[in-house]
Image (cartoon, helix red, strand yellow):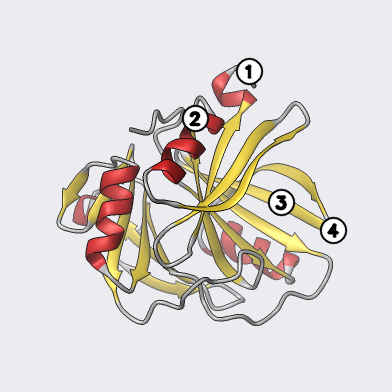
Amino acid sequence: MVDLAKPAIDVGLYTNTREAQLNFWQQDVGLEFSELLRVGGGVHQLRHAIGDSVLKINNCRDPLPQAPASGIRGLTIASDVDAVQQLRDPDGNAVRLVPQGHDEISQIRVQLCVSDLSRQQDFWGGILALPELRSNIFLCGVSQLELVEGDANPDPLQRALGYRYLTIQVYDVKATHNHVISHGGREGSAPIRLGEVAHISFVRDPDGNWLEISQRKSITGSLD
């Protein structure tokens, strides 16, 4: 079972259109900028709070490939809107704004397109032990992950235009990483230390979607 250090999922996207993306997410969606991280390789991560979650806008200096979409096909955000709004950001990522409490959404719901519901249920509900709100909607604290069977692209690139990865915060990244791999999950990259900021690793779901496991010092209080 995964010991979450933060009761929420974070969402990471990659872009080459920094200013257009900031204008959309801050002005059209209403998110607040929280932090800039220089993560290396010409990438600036512009972090925006969505309740307990973070939207990570990774702006890349070098042109990103137009690769097939990852399984992350939509992000629903509970907001102060009066009615449901269907939007797309400058790179075409689907965003839905809904009134608070609409369809039991209190903060965010991530829509994940999958090729095989049974295998994905085993991964998210079994290996990661996320509880189900109802059929195929899993809870990560106050965040929700909805599995929708469809035209999932196998083994999507981790760094390409669009939504590319999810993040969970844990108290022990090495133990969590080893738990996922030993129970049938796929390794994306082994745990590494990012200075005094965090330990991170990546694992992959049955379709190859990327899940970052992070032990962030500002949340856990320690990197030991």
Q: Are marks 4 and 1 in contact (CB under 8 Å)?
A: no
Asked if residue 223 is positioned above or below residue 51 in the image, the reply reads: above
Q: Nearer the viewer, mark 4 or mark 1?
A: 1
Q: CA distance from mark 1 to mark 3?
A: 25 Å
Which numbered tag is attached to residue 42? 4
Position of residue 44 in the picture relative to residue 67 (left or right)? right
Amino acid at pointer 1? Asp
Q: Name the foreground residue: 93 vs 81.
A: 93
| First reached walking from the N terminus: tag 3 or tag 2 | 3
Q: Amino acid at mark 3?
A: Gln
Circle 4/circle 2 CB separation < 8 Å:
no
Report the amino acid beneath label 2: Ala
Residue at 63% across / 18% down in the picture? 224
Q: Amino acid at mark 4?
A: Gly
State which mark lies toward you, 2 or 1.
2
Q: Which residue is mark 2?
A: 175
Q: CA distance from mark 4 to mark 3?
A: 10 Å
- Circle nearer the N terminus (4, 1): 4
At x 77%, y 47%, the residue is 39
Q: CA distance from mark 3 to mark 2?
A: 26 Å
Tell me which numbered mark, 1 or 3, is placed earlier along the sequence: 3
